[in-house]
Amino acid sequence: MNQDWESLATGVYRCRLEFLDVTVGLVLGDDGALLIDSGTTFEEARSIEADVRRFDQRGVRHRVLTHDHFDHILCSAVFAEAAVHAMPAVAETMC
């Protein structure tokens, strides 16, 4: 694993990313993985992606972007094939 994932419940994890101390969440479900926020740097996001594939080979299928701060959404493009769930303000920031 690239990140230090803490198990919160069965199939539910979080990790705190080194740069800017951002917390990212992960929920493993029947339809694949749901990622909560995406990290600040492409290096972080790629390491998260690799870790998620160790949990579930299908990778990130859904991503929730909690708010429009750059340190939570900047590297969302690494997970471009995953469905996005976010508030309208997040979508406006990303456009």
Image (spheres, grey):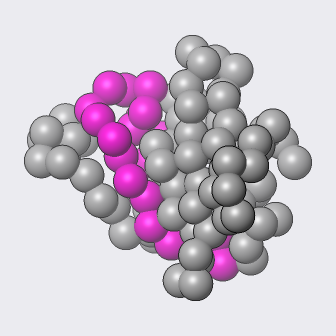
Q: Which residue: 81% across, 37% down?
A: 4
Q: Give residue 50's quadrant in the image.
A: bottom right
Residue at the outermost top position: 20
Residue 78 visible in the snapshot = no
Q: Which residue: 44% across, 26% down?
A: 71
Above-or-below relation of 72 to 86: above
In this rendering, would 50 be left or right of 17? right
67 magenta-colored: yes
Coordinates of residue 10 in the picture (x, y in percent) = 70, 64
7 magenta-colored: no
Coordinates of residue 3 in the picture (x, y in percent) = 79, 39
Residue sitting nearer the eye, 33 or 29: 29
Residue at the outermost front position: 9
In this rendering, would 93 be left or right of 63? left
Numbered range of the magenta stretch: 58-76
Residue sitting nearer the eye, 43 or 30: 30
Residue at the outermost right position: 1
Residue 21 visible in the snapshot = yes
Q: Give residue 85's quadrant in the image.
A: bottom left
Above-or-below relation of 78 to 4: below
Q: Which residue: 87% across, 48% down?
A: 1
Numbered disc total: 0
Above-or-below relation of 71 to 87: above
Image quarter where the C terminus lies is top left
Coordinates of residue 24 in the picture (x, y in percent) = 56, 40
Coordinates of residue 86 in the picture (x, y in percent) = 25, 52
